């Protein structure tokens, strides 16, 4: 499990992505390795789709990916 707390998500994200982010953060703080691993895949796919749809910028995608060790 990896979460870089210096990468702040202080920008507006779609509700679907917001929910996934809340869930993965909770699983990290609860030390739930399995749930974290599964949600990491969700973060990746939902974040990419949000960027493709124009709901977040590529810079914001990069911030989210760096927060969860995807970059």
Image: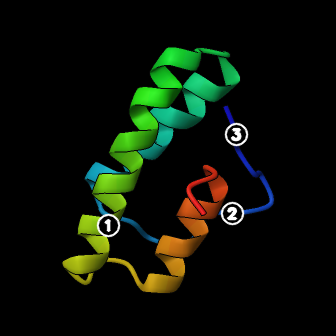
Q: In which quadrant will I find the N terminus?
A: top right
In the shown orientation, is residue 4 left or right of residue 63?
A: right
Task: Determine the image quadrant of residue 20.
Answer: top left
In the shown orientation, is residue 13 left or right of residue 52?
A: right
Task: Determine the image quadrant of residue 48.
Answer: bottom left
Few, some or many C-alpha atoms within 10 Å of disc 1 (few <14, some 14-19, many ≥20)? some
Pointer 2 residue: 8
Question: From mark 2 to mark 1, how far is it between C-alphas?
Answer: 18 Å
Pointers 2 and 3 in contact (C-beta within 8 Å): no
Pointer 1 residue: 48
Residue drawn at 58 percent across, 18 percent down = 33
2 or 1: mark nearer the eye: 1
Task: Determine the image quadrant of residue 19.
Answer: top left
Q: How many marks?
A: 3
Residue drawn at 71 percent across, 63 percent down = 7
Disc 1 is placed on an element classified as helix
Q: Earlier in the sequence, mark 3 or mark 1?
A: 3
The x and y percentages for residue 70 are 56, 56
Q: Earlier in the sequence, mark 2 or mark 3?
A: 3
59 or 17: nearer the eye? 59
Disc 2 is placed on an element classified as loop
33 or 29: nearer the eye? 33
Pointer 3 residue: 2
The x and y percentages for residue 4 are 75, 51
Few, some or many C-alpha atoms within 10 Å of disc 3 (few <14, some 14-19, many ≥20)? some
* Rendered position, 3 above or below 12: above
In the shown orientation, is residue 33 left or right of residue 42?
A: right
Q: Earlier in the sequence, mark 2 or mark 1?
A: 2
Question: From mark 2 to mark 3, how far is it between C-alphas?
Answer: 14 Å
Whether residue 18 appears in this view of the structure is yes
The x and y percentages for residue 61 are 47, 72
């Amino acid at each position: 499990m990896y979460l870089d707390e210096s990468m702040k998500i202080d920008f507006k994200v779609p509700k679907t992505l917001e929910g996934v982010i809340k869930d993965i953060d909770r699983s990290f703080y609860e030390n739930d390795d399995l749930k974290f691993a599964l949600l990491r895949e969700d973060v990746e796919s939902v974040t990419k789709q949000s960027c493709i749809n124009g709901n977040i910028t590529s810079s914001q995608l990069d911030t989210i990916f760096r927060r969860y060790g995807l970059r």
